[in-house]
């Protein structure tokens, strides 16, 4: 997979001098970066071999806004609302309360210490896409919440794609200062009919005693290739709750690296995904325990219909010094069709004795006993399946960071299940 | 054509896996009638109830079942329920994430009945059998005690108002008061809506309130003896050995009795 991306595109990208230099360095070295291969565990079972990067071109400038922008989701109820269109900052607004508390939302170059933030959580790119994001991404968005600030309302970031045949590299940096309480909700969407590749990166730094709730609601069009990477660094006694709703995309990959670096740090990782037609959802998770008394708990649940596929591959890694680690990992999959396919690969790498770890994974059809029970009360088979699948997602939905995210996810799942029902029982739709 | 109102089981034979369990059951339950089925552990009582509702894992090898003229064996389980059959399971299944109300609402919608009254009916019926209203909000059977699950089955029967109900050991796990309340509720349904009942039990206590018209003793997948209510008392006093003799703990006897149309059996034997 030689990279046909034109280096002059990278050179033409605007930004502060340090970023321009950094891009140039990355572009110069990019020829030496091996493209991902399914021989690597972290890409095993993926469809990376089917991705034809030549079809997509990075953008040197923001594409002009042809159609008036969709609803940005800005409401007075948000602490801040930001729109990244094709990776570029299109629009942002911040509530008076949040601004008064010193919260900043804007281009990373506008921060005096922006250079120090960039790549501070993700010091080396994980793969070719990480390099491409650095080389061909526009200036990243930075959200900084100063020490001690507690935000009741969420910061909402819309990451929208409307450029066609484009390779897009949005990048977001979040810093939650000491003893902060922050909720960040990202909505990833795309214009219908667009066929592009989006490879976003999130770096989130959760400092001591802070709490970050983060959601990524991925509802891209079915023409999109999505290769997302999110990295969290969690300091002493801080907590991160991550939440991914994997709904759209033709191939949607989300890699989550959660590093617990301070004593007593905690992470709760959640995902819900639904595959239909020939979608592929691909999740890679790393629960890295690098300090004593750290806890991580992961629950990923998915339902697969049609010929859709899912991959869950997760590693719990416990460093020698991370004594008294508690780490849990659960992945459950329901196959709604005989042709759907789910791979679940949990892994442990533990270098100390004093730990409590568990992992569990299941791939199964809808529970036959439960199905029979509902049917024996008079509920038609397909409707019983819908009830059971909705119920299956109950616990993950209850872990959504905001009520709005939970409701939106439930609504989308119900819509998908209704569509499934209409396809299976056309007579009932009439 | 108006067909006769009866749940009619004729020559019903069924196997689970490779095992022949039911060896030719004949039973007729009419509206308002109560038929009790008793019999030793493993004699096939639950199997009969499952086969009637079409639970996966069984194969009907011979015989027929009709409900008011409708061939049940042709139908999917939910269609059997919609045709008017109800099954209270011996071991009710827990269904996490699904509420009792949404389940019954979907059942009502599928049957073309008004779902709006379900909530109110649940409250009224729960009161009638002493089922605490707080359980109504829970996912179906989740975190209910054994006895509460049985009450939940009785509650659902009352709300669904089937034409025929098969109650598989609905009394097991119930405390004395609950037993009386549930038995009375079923008895009332036979009077009020003409419910026909096939009640499976090990104890005559239930039958003191829910008075059976007939008592059938099942052994090795066949009805060995049928009689009036006095048969239940006899069983209580003498145990099964008194009535079934050797058959109780000698499964081979079932084969000698011609259990099931074994395709490899000698037809002249
Ligand atoms: N899937 C199966 N494969 C083989 N044998 C089975 C299967 N299911 C049930 N059986 C057997 O069928 C027989 C009848 O079981 P059933 O549950 O109908 O008994 P029962 O009369 O309801 O007993 P109890 O009074 O204990 O409830 C038992 O011997 C049981 O072991
Ligand atoms: Mg039984």
Image: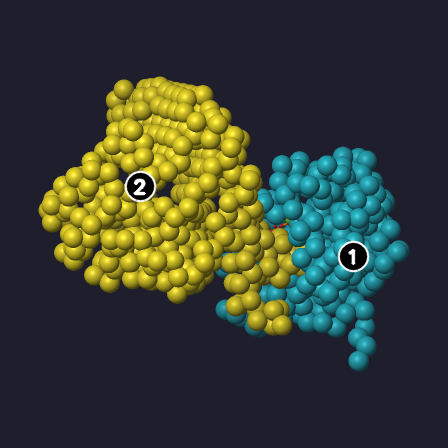
**Residue A82 seen anywhere in this rendered image of the structure:** yes
Residue lying at 64% horizontally and 59% vertically, measured from the top left: A379
Residue holding disc 1 = B161
Query: Which residue occupies the extreme bottom position in the image?
Result: B1
Q: Position of residue A6 (x, y in %)?
A: 16, 55
Q: Report how far apart the C-alphas of labels 1 and 2 lie in the structure.
A: 63 Å
Q: Looking at the image, which is closer to me, B218 or A187?
A: A187
Q: Nearer the viewer, residue A238 or A385?
A: A238
Instruction: Answer with the quarter of the image where residue B106 lies.
Output: bottom right
Residue to which mark 2 is pinned: A140
User: Split into 4 quadrants, where in the image is the C terminus of chain B?
Assistant: bottom right
Residue name at image x 70 percent, y 49 percent: B101
Q: Where is residue A142 in the image (x, y as percent from the top left)?
A: 35, 36
Chain ID for label 2?
A
Give the secondary structure at mark 1.
loop
Chain rendered yellow:
A
> Mark 1, chain letter?
B
Q: In this view, does A170 lie to the left or right of B41?
A: left
Label 2 crowd bin: few (<14), some (14–19), many (20+), radius 10 Å:
many
Report the side of A378 relative to B123 (left or right): left
Residue A271: quadrant of the picture: top left
In the image, is residue B141 above or below residue A161? above
Mark 2 vs ligand 1: CB below 8 Å? no
Label 2 element class? loop
Tell me the shade of chain B.
cyan
């Amino acid at each position: 997979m030689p990279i046909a991306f034109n280096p002059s595109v990278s050179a033409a990208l605007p930004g502060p001098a340090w970023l321009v230099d950094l891009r140039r360095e990355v572009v110069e070295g990019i020829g030496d970066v091996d493209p991902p291969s399914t021989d690597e565990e972290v890409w095993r079972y993926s469809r990376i071999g089917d991705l034809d990067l030549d079809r997509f071109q990075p953008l040197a400038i923001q594409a002009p806004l042809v159609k008036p922008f969709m609803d940005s989701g800005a409401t007075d109820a948000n602490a801040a609302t930001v729109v990244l269109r094709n990776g570029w900052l299109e629009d942002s607004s911040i509530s008076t309360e949040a601004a008064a508390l010193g919260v900043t939302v804007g281009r990373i170059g506008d921060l005096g210490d922006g250079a120090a933030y960039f790549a501070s959580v993700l010091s080396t790119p994980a793969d070719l896409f990480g390099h491409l994001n650095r080389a061909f991404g526009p200036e990243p968005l930075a959200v900084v919440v100063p020490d001690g600030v507690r935000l009741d309302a969420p910061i909402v970031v819309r990451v929208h794609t409307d450029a066609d045949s484009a390779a897009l590299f949005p990048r977001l940096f979040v810093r939650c200062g000491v003893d902060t309480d922050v909720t960040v909700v990202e909505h990833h969407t795309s214009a219908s009919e667009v066929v592009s590749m989006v490879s976003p990166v999130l770096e989130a730094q959760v400092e001591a005693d802070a709490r970050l709730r983060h959601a990524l609601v991925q509802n891209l069009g079915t023409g999109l290739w999505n290769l997302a990477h999110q990295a969290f660094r969690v300091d002493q006694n801080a907590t991160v709750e991550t939440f991914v709703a994997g709904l759209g995309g033709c191939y949607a990959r989300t890699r989550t690296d959660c590093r617990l670096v301070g004593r007593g740090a905690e992470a709760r990782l959640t995902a819900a995904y639904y595959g239909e037609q020939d979608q592929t959802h691909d999740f890679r998770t790393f629960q890295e325990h690098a300090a004593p008394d750290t806890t991580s708990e992961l629950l990923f649940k998915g339902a697969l219909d049609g010929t859709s596929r899912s991959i869950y591959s997760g590693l719990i890694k416990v460093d020698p010094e991370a004594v008294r680690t508690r780490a849990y990992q659960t992945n459950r999959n329901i196959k709604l069709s005989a042709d759907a396919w789910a791979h679940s690969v949990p892994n442990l790498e533990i270098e100390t004795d004093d730990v409590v770890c568990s992992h569990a994974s299941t791939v199964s059809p809808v529970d036959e006993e439960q199905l029979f029970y509902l049917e024996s009360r008079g509920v038609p088979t397909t409707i019983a399946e819908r009830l059971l699948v909705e119920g299956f997602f109950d616990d993950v939905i209850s872990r959504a960071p905001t009520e709005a995210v939970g409701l939106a996810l439930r609504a989308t799942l119900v819509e998908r299940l209704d569509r499934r029902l209409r396809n299976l029982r056309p007579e009932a739709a009439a | 054509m108006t067909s006769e109102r009866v749940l009619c089981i004729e020559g019903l034979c069924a196997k689970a896996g490779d095992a022949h369990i039911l060896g030719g059951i004949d039973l007729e339950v009419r509206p308002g009638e109560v038929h009790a089925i008793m019999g030793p552990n493993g004699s096939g009582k639950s199997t009969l109830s499952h086969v009637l509702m079409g639970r996966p894992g069984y194969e009907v090898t011979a015989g027929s079942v009709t409900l008011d003229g409708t061939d049940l064996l042709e139908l999917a389980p939910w269609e059997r329920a919609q045709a008017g059959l109800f099954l209270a399971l011996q071991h009710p299944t827990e269904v996490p994430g699904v509420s009792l109300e949404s389940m019954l609402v979907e059942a009502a919608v599928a049957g073309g009945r008004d779902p709006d009254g379900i909530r109110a009916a649940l409250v009224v019926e729960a009161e009638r059998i002493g089922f605490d209203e707080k359980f109504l909000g829970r996912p179906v059977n989740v975190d209910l005690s054994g006895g509460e699950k049985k009450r939940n089955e009785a509650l659902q029967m009352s709300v669904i108002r089937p034409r025929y109900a098969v109650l598989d050991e609905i009394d097991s796990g119930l405390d004395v008061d609950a037993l009386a309340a549930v038995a009375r509720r079923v008895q009332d349904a036979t009077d009020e809506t003409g419910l026909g009942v096939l009640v499976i039990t090990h104890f005559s206590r239930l039958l003191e309130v829910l008075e059976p018209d007939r008592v059938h003793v099942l052994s090795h997948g066949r009805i060995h003896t049928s009689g009036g209510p006095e048969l239940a008392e006899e069983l209580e006093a003498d145990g099964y050995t008194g009535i079934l003799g050797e058959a109780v703990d000698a499964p081979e006897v079932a084969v000698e009795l011609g259990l099931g149309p074994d395709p490899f059996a000698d037809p002249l034997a």
